[in-house]
Amino acid sequence: MEETRQNWDKIGANLNNIRTKTLIKDADVVVVRFGDKYRQWNAAFDVGYAAALNKSIITLHPPHISHMLKEVNASASAVCEDPHQVVDTLAYVIRGDLPAPRDGDGYVAIADRLGKGNPNP
């Protein structure tokens, strides 16, 4: 199609740029997903743009690419490894809902683990 529609990719990229910039500007929180299917350079660029606008950022990616994204994660308010963590994070931020402990019945509150004499219970 490039032969019949010159600059098709550039036109599409420009329109996507308008859309993405508008959505990021209007967002309270920006969630950016990376991974085997979401490792695009434009996603990292979107994080940079959101950071420049001082937006709250949540990154979502599997642990095996954390090192590659260390600078991106440094600008994020939260780093999640699965979509459920993003949902839990947003539920806490929006409504103050705390998720159930992920360690199940083995959960012991930090105040109980460290004892009552802890200066930071």
Image (cartoon, rainbow, N blue to C red):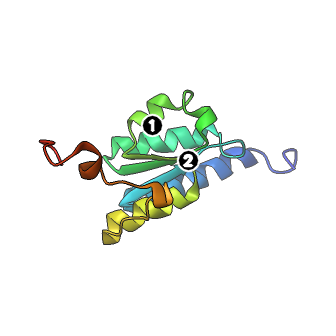
Q: Can residue 21 be seen in this view?
A: no
x and y percentages locating residue 35 in the rendered image: 65, 43
Q: What residue does disc 1 label?
A: 73
x and y percentages locating residue 56 in the rendered image: 35, 51
Q: What residue does disc 2 label?
A: 81
Which is nearer the eye, 58 or 26? 58
Q: Which amino acid does label 1 sit on?
A: Asn
Query: Is 40 situated left or right of 84 in this image?
Result: right
Query: Is 32 situated left or right of 117 in this image?
Result: right
| Total numbered badges shown on the rendered structure | 2
Q: Which amino acid does label 2 sit on?
A: Glu
Q: Can residue 40 be seen in this view?
A: yes
Q: Quadrant of residue 40?
A: top right
Query: Is 76 situated left or right of 63 in this image?
Result: left
Query: Is 16 situated left or right of 94 in this image?
Result: right
Residue at position x 38%, y 38% in the image: 75
Which is nearer the eye, 79 or 40? 79
Q: Name the residue furthest bottom.
A: 95
For label 1, the crowd category at 10 Å Cα-Cα, with few meaning under 14, some 14 to 19 and many 20 or more, is some
Residue at position x 44%, y 50% in the image: 58
